[in-house]
Image (cartoon, rainbow, N blue to C red):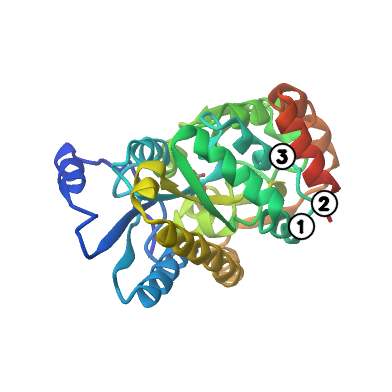
Amino acid sequence: MMRFPGKTLVSAAALLALSALPSFAADKIVLRSSDTHVADYPTIKAVEYMSQILEKETNGRLSIKVFPAAQLGEEKDTIEQTQLGVLDMNRVSMVALNNIIPMSQVPSLPFLFKSVAQMRRVLDGPIGDDILASFAEKNLIGLAFYDSGARSFYNVKQPINTPEDMKGMKIRVQQSDLMVGMVKALGANPTPMPFGEVYSALQTGAIDGAENNWPSYYTTRHFEVAKFYSETEHLMVPEALMMSKMTWDKLSKDDQKLVRDAAKKSALKMHELWEAEEKVAYDAVVKAGSKINKVDKAPFIAAMAPIYDKYVTDQKMKDMVARIRAAE
Ligand code: GTR
């Protein structure tokens, strides 16, 4: 399944109907969760897997219903809905939280993790738990990290080999000041924009390129319009699975524990799903004629280094960067 290219509109009526739904009937709890991706994307399968665990352990009393394809809105809006308790759960990119939760900027820094394997080790352990705990200050409960591989730049014009090749290019970024700063540091022009608008923006020439991992490049069909994919792998930024604190506070202590444990198990499942999907996506875009090039990362790392001084501002964030860098 592909994501429908174009703007996703959420009607006020749909939202009203949704908020009127009693997710907490006396004997049954159905947690409503949002995702921007298409129905068979790994993030959605992972949350559905989490639901199966919960259903099994509670004889169907506790489950999750996932609303895919940005049906409930783009990430920025659904995060607000989750903070307000209109939505119970949400799966978003960590970057979507950057302007709300300062600590979320740390795992969103370019070239921070040494490899995807190191990122998994770090985030599946106590460092990851500390980052998730920082969500609570904003009415959100961080449950788990999901895979998102590595993000690279792709564009409609030419292969990118050095930052100079990006001069003057209009590059879509997620709605985060850190991402705006990152693309500026490379000499290109950042355009923050919701995910669902990128396809048509590439098509009409409103932007020249964007950046994402293989599965997102593929399922959004961006590969049809932006053929040049340059493996900068500048970001290894995880996905975040979270719950509204308002929903969390309504759960019993036992149910909270079940939810946390099931979320952690679903993160392990996600690792498998992700690897399979990366391969499917890579093979499909190669077959469709994408022009892929390897990149010497050194000049990109050098150009983005000042981002650390600009965005890692408080001591807590500095300590977190140091912990991640020191971790094996
Ligand atoms: C994807 C991520 C989405 C969304 C998207 C984007 O990799 O899974 O949650 O953040 O990137 O670029 O907007």
Quadrant location, the C terminus: bottom right
Q: For marks 3 and 1, give the CA distance.
A: 15 Å
| Nearer to us in this view, 248 or 284 | 248
Q: Quadrant of residue 196?
A: top left
Q: Of marks 3 and 1, which one's residue comes earlier in the chain?
A: 3
Q: Secondary structure at mark 1?
A: helix
Q: Examine the rendered structure and indicate whether residue 204 appears above or below residue 275.
A: above
Q: Percent x, y for residue 157?
A: 60, 41
Instruction: Name the residue rendered at 51%, 55% in the picture.
Output: 216
Q: Of marks 1 and 2, which one's residue comes earlier in the chain?
A: 1
Say if residue 205 shows up in the picture.
Answer: no
Q: Amino acid at mark 2?
A: Ala
Q: Of marks 3 and 2, which one's residue comes earlier in the chain?
A: 3
Q: Are marks 1 and 2 in contact (CB under 8 Å)?
A: yes
Q: Residues within 10 Å of mark 1 (few under 14, many from 20)?
A: some
Q: Specify the label residue 66 is tagged with.
A: none
Instruction: Name the residue rendered at 14%, 41% in the picture.
Output: 13
Q: Secondary structure at mark 3?
A: loop
| Nearer to us in this view, 299 or 12 | 12
Instruction: Name the residue rendered at 67%, 54% in the picture.
Output: 123
